Image (cartoon, helix red, strand yellow):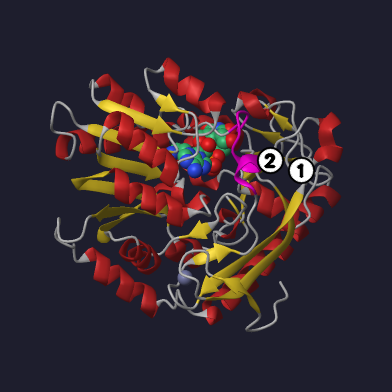
Amino acid sequence: MNLQDGQQISACRLCGGHVRQVLDFGRQPVSNAFIRPEDLERETYFELTVGLCENCSMVQQLNEVARDRMFHHDYPYRSSLSSLMSKHFAQVAQQLVETELLDSDSFVVEIGSNDGILLSAVSEEGIRHLGVDPSRGAANVAAERGVRVMVDFFEENTARRIRAEHGPADVIFSANTTSHIAYLDSVLRGVELLLAPGGVFVVEDRYLADIIANNYFDQIYDEHFYLFSVRSVAALAARSGLELVDAERLPVHGGSIRYTIARPGTRPVRNAVPELIEEERAAGLADAATFRGFATNIDRVGNDLVTLLRELRAEGKSVLGYGATSKSATVTNYFDIGPELVPYVCDTTPEKHGRVSPGSHIPVRPAEAFQPYPDYALLFAWNHAEEIMAKERGFRESGGRWILYVPDVHIA
Ligand code: SAM
Ligand code: TMP
Ligand code: ZN
């Protein structure tokens, strides 16, 4: 990864501060654009570069992919395919119902409701709710589960329409979505005008500290426009006339945080907020030098992984991919891994079958195509390792081995 130290690229998308480029993955495809083999010439790319705001410390991409190129009616990601995440969101729903949605008229809005993984449980309790998601395919699945969805992008105007039709929201929830929205300032203005006076905006997202500590570089792809830290989210909330009152670490997606944001002075600020901000300072999360170390680790993993895959090929061993994740776009395209090293990848998502992975053009096949077992399987869906390894127990029992590449390349 070659970067000119101190290169100035642009201004912070949120505070206008000076942004220093810290990572450069070069030309990358839209990560969820699994294409039909006959449509390859229609594929489009963008430059995946990451910067650090020297004012508010928000880590952000420097080139924005138009939102409707990523999120459209055929967006294939389906949250509920993971039983781990289904369990997680059922618990979150339960907690919200027990602590926040206490009134018979309580109202919850979810930004990025996808296939109804959270709101289906809320709907079962008969609570007023509205999901907002631009992906019609996912919204149709949610509707079948009794979830009411507005098929649209959440932004200031959407919030105004919701408020006019339904009144203020006691809870606005959003998981793994707000970091995807470059125009986050508009989202926060929308939250500010939609939130009830005593309401909460609860956001779950991957945590920059975990990404860097564990070398989870493949969490960086088009959709993850921002990489949140407690400091940068606290600054964002404050600039929007709101206050970050709690930050809880979560194990999901390799390490996330649940941020609770409220109107200033309405809730006590938990100690976790200043404590985590201090931990982030000690870990150098806002220092360009930390990202130089990260870039070195990423390139080392790339060399090790490609060397291993070439050696296995030379030895005549068979290798398949497991999990056609969005994350794998960065791995396969930055390290130049194509079907000659990984002939196909198995995945449970019907919408991805018969298609090829973006940029690297590795065919995607159903999980059943994992048998007869290969000698090795490259686990792109490492965040679901426990679930997948348990489900595919027979693979290891018959002598197969998993290849993982985070935090470094190893065989399990
Ligand atoms: N919340 C689910 C979860 O945690 O599994 C879904 C996460 S998925 C990665 C992101 C979702 O956000 C997609 O369903 C996408 O269509 C939706 N999305 C993207 N931009 C959005 C916006 N501006 N407003 C509402 N939803 C959006
Ligand atoms: P994610 O890392 O973005 O959650 O995507 C996980 C991908 O892995 C998704 O395409 C579905 C796939 N998957 C399987 O193929 N088998 C499984 O058991 C699980 C949990 C996920
Ligand atoms: Zn900034």
First reached walking from the N terminus: tag 1 or tag 2: 2
Q: Disc 1 vs disc 2: Cβ atoms closer than 8 Å?
A: yes
**Residue that badge 2 annotates:** 321
Looking at numbered disc 1 in the image, what kind of residue is underneath it? Val
Q: Secondary structure at mark 2?
A: strand
Q: Specify whether residue 399 is in view.
A: yes
**Is 14 on the left-hand or right-hand side of 48?**
left
Q: Image quarter for residue 27?
A: bottom right
Residue numbers of the magenta segment: 66-76
**Residue that badge 1 annotates:** 342
Residue 220, relative to residue 86: is it above or below? below
Residue 93 position within the rendered picture, expressed as x and y whole percent measured from the top left: 28, 34
Q: Image quarter for residue 298?
A: bottom right
Residue 337, relative to residue 110: is it above or below? below
Q: Determine the residue located farthest toward the bottom in the rendered image.
A: 5
Q: Image quarter for residue 77?
A: top right
- What crowding class fits label 2: few (fewer than 14 Cα within 10 Å), some (14-19), or many (20 or more)? many
Tell whether position 119 is magenta: no
Q: Secondary structure at mark 1?
A: loop
**Is 286 on the left-hand or right-hand side of 20?**
left
Looking at numbered disc 2 in the image, what kind of residue is underneath it? Gly
Q: Determine the residue located farthest toward the front in the rendered image.
A: 164
